[in-house]
Amino acid sequence: MVLAIAVPMTLAYLTTPLIGVVGTAVVGQFGDAALIGGLAAGAIVFDVVFATFNFLRSGTTGLVAQAFGRGDGQEEQAVFWRALALALVAGVALALLASFFVAAGIWFLDAEPAVNAALESYVLIRFLGAPLALANYVVLGYVLGRGEATLGLALQVVLNGTNIALCFHLGLDLGWRIEGIAWAAVFAELVAFVVGLAMLAARFRRRGWVSVARIADLPAFVAMLSLNRDIMIRSFSLLAAFALFARQGAQFGTLTLAANAVLMNFFLVAGYFLDGFATAAEQLAGRAIGARDRLAFSRAVRLSTVWGFGLAFATTAALLLFGNAFIAIITTAPDVRSVAATYLPWAAFTAVSGVLAFAMDGVFIGATWSRDMRNMMVLSFALFLVALLTLGAAFGNHGLWAALHLFLLVRGFSLLAVLPRRARATFGQASGRLAQ
């Protein structure tokens, strides 16, 4: 069951960082470090804001998985519509606030003028698709909550495949450069949402529509908002750490910013490998809790973690062996290639230092233990800030990467320390049915 979910979703998630790789490669063909840095900076602004709303995906997955474990199909559908309503309202608000986020990003990153100009062009266009992007989080969350990884893979292939194809066409063929990369993402979100909603609407129509009264159930909405609030704080802290990492890299110069942007694509690739097993942990942990099955919960935790470690070591080895070749594909700028090669080992080992963080995130999301996720993330972020200020000042960009590794390790081990107590409180003496 772990592999049936993890393998398709690993393939699905791998298509997401490919967008970053392709986008960087497209603007990299123009040989301008400022364009690479601007795309990286703009993507950071977009990701900090939108990953903060990732609760619409992960919260939906956990709640749907638990309803699935209880055999409550009407509640599964109700969770979807509640989350979709939140997504559309939030997406419209974000689109209206796009200029504010541009100004905040330029102030925060404090990069060179050419980088700031590219950032502004990218972000203003990307935010036009905000309602669609958040709605797609909900569609994917519902699908994953039911453990339908193959359907999740298909939806991600539609989204990211369309995006990649349009990146080449708009960015290179039509010469739209960074603006083409942004429009490609917006059009791809529209296509994916239309396809996903059509599929789910056909399913709901066959199985019977849930009543409006159940969708609008106030206690259920309050519970969803409470869960999503904690996950939002956790997600914001996570992306704030990555944003601070990029900002500090920008202070070391445009070349370092561009090199780190290239290498962060490797970290994202490694992360999306691990996210497949984290997604398996989400669905199976949530399903076990819904069914009150402690044995199945323990098996889901153990197997997703063991497989995650095996994949992490394999990913690190691949990046160490072929990383320089990947760098050469992404950018044609010789100075960016040289700087990126210097820090390649740091990026390669992020898979190993981050594997436990990914696995525990999956377990806690599926279990909807959001308060513990929030608290441990705040602790990890505080320690990251200390490391960033001390190691970065002492060792430059090497210290910056060391601080990132510390952040990943603290995230994983802090949640692991909390896990036994939370499992005892949740299950008590419940056992056996789902695993059998």
Image (cartoon, rainbow, N blue to C red):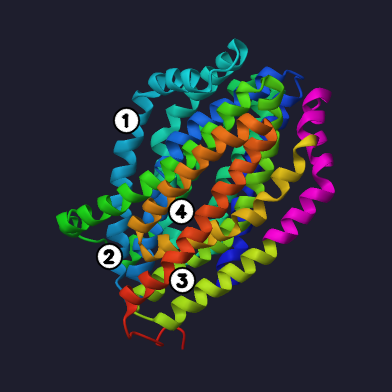
Tell me what residue is drawn at x 33 percent, y 56 percent.
Answer: 371
Q: Is mark 4 on a helix, strand or loop?
A: helix
SS of the residue under disc 3: helix
Mark 2 → mark 4, Cα distance in angstroms = 17 Å
To which residue does mark 2 refer? 75
* C-alpha distance separating marks 1 and 4: 21 Å
Q: Give the range drawn in magenta.
A: 312-341
Sequence order check: which comes first, mark 1 or mark 2?
Answer: 2
Mark 4: amino acid? Leu
Disc 1 vs disc 2: Cβ atoms closer than 8 Å? Answer: no
How many tags in the picture?
4
N-term mark: 3 or 2: 2
Check residue 222 in the rendering and tell me which mark sits there, or answer none.
Answer: none
- Give the residue drawn at x 58%, y 28%: 248
Q: Nearer the viewer, mark 3 or mark 4?
A: 3
Disc 4 target residue: 140
Q: Is residue 211 magenta?
A: no
Find disc 3 in the rendering and name its residue. 284
Q: Which of 360 and 289 is in front in this view?
A: 360
Q: In front here: 317 or 245?
A: 245
Looking at the image, residue 300 sits to the left or right of residue 339; the answer is left
Vertical position of residue 36 compared to residue 428: above or below: above
Circle 2/circle 4 CB separation < 8 Å: no
Distance in Å between CA atoms under marks 3 and 4 = 16 Å
Residue 93, numbered circle = 1
Q: Nearer the viewer, residue 227 or 378?
A: 378
Within 10 angstroms of label 3, few (less than 14), some, or many (20 or more) residues? many
The image shows residue 234, relative to residue 399, as above or below, that is below
Residue shown at 38%/20% (left/top)? 100
Q: Estimate the x, y position of residue 319 in percent, counting from the top left.
A: 77, 49
